[in-house]
Image (tube, helix red, strand yellow):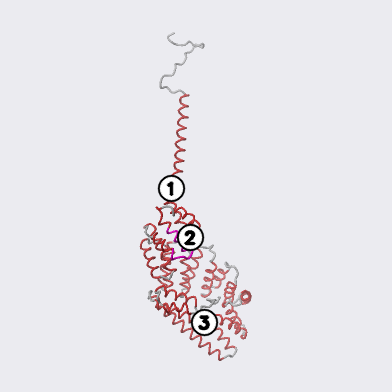
Amino acid sequence: MNGLVEMPSGGTAPSSPGIGEITPRRQRRRHRLADALLRCLVLGCLFGGAGWSWWCWQSPEHRAARALSAGDANDFETIRYQLLGLQAMPAVEAEANLLSGKLLLARNDPERALYDFAVAATKPAIQPRALVLTGACLYQTGHLLEAGKDWAAAIKLDSQNADAYRWLGVAYYDLGAVELARDALKKAAELAPDDPGPHRLIGLICTDNADPQGAVAAYREALRRAPERDDNDEIRLRLADVLHRVHQEVEALNVLAECPSSPEVLAYRAECEFSLGNDAPAWQMLEQSLREDEELVRALGLKGKMLLKNRQYAAAVQSLETAFKLAPKDAAILYDLQIAYQRTNQRDKVAEFERRLKEIDRLEAEYGALTDEARRDLQDSQLRYRLGMAAVRLEKFPLAKKWFEVALGLDPTNADARSALNRIKWPAQMKARY
């Protein structure tokens, strides 16, 4: 039979598998083994990657980077949390000092913060940030020139440092160098496209320097950048005031419509309506404004103006005299009151107020000449003292206080400025309410 197994059907039996020959069973085993190895490999990669990611996330460098980002956003809760771990990590001692100093600065303790920033400045990677914050401490403690040097050094190390440009803009504004202030603030705004702060100050600079179109553009940009800020109503009032001055009453009313009702908002709206010839709604708003705040100068002045228009001269005198007591150097109030005295035949008072108006013109011219000098000379402390005294004579008390403080910031030994700050009895209400 030649070694063949005889089959009942008459066929031949299959031969036994030889060595190395793959059967279906062996193939299935190999597939299962390969699948198991692949699963182990994938799981190993996943767990290894997760472990590596966790280690990186918890590494001193990554924790410091997250904490610094929180510092840039003034997220003090996150800063405090991250500091708990960073202070025990020698590799990031400089970052920990930077953040610790920022917390101290936020708590109004610049003297202690200065030490932390000095340590932080020893690490080149964060030196520009440390210099900016050192300057902020010096600014708060009245060392204006030293602060400016630190901000300039920060810009030299990092020309894209928006905070350094912003602080320089503030310092230049304080010194009276408004052109330099505007340039620095524009650079800060360019580098920090979401920050409304630079445009807020640019708007104020333009308002103070007879540039209403520049002020309108700056205030609108500040509102566009941060439309949900809690203090935007103050900016809207400034914007509406500028629009009213350039006779864009409808635009001003549109801006005021976004503000919640208040005595100030009602007075602004009444002014705009009166300018448009809508006397009835203007009077209604004015009356409501004065019911809520009977010493609001803007409302009292407008009431006097409206009463003059309606030939109610005695009532106009009463309203304008009240405004004059609150703001005795407001030229617009004095001018309208002089007219009211003319209409009521009070000639002696007409002559008196004519002298007062000439004196205000003289004081304003004196103040303007001093501000022009201040733009050209950034280091004259005594010049800032003289500006402060000129502001006192105009009864611009918040402005006077600022000039005396700037004078001391330039020269802490300026006895005149220090004496003025201590001697002048600052009114409890530093500014008449408008």
| Amino acid type shown at disc 2 | Asn
Residue at x 40% of width, y 53% of height: 90
Residue 98 forms part of the magenta stretch: yes
Q: Amino acid at mark 1?
A: Cys
Residue 306, position in %: x, y? Answer: 60, 80
Magenta region, main secondary structure: helix
Q: Quadrant of residue 136?
A: bottom left
Q: Disc number at residue 342?
A: none
The mark found on residue 56 in the picture is 1
Q: In the rendered image, which residue does mark 3 sit on?
A: 329
Counting residues from the start of the chain, the first of labels 2 and 3 encountered is 2
Residue 26 in the image, given as x and y percentages of width and height: 46, 24
Q: Residues within 10 Å of mark 3 (few under 14, many from 20)?
A: some
Q: Which residues are magenta?
A: 97-112
Q: Quadrant of the N terminus?
A: top left
Quadrant of the snapshot with the C terminus: bottom right
Q: What secondary structure is marked by label 3?
A: loop
Residue behind mark 2: 74
Tag nearer the camera, 3 or 1: 1
Q: Residue type at mark 3?
A: Lys
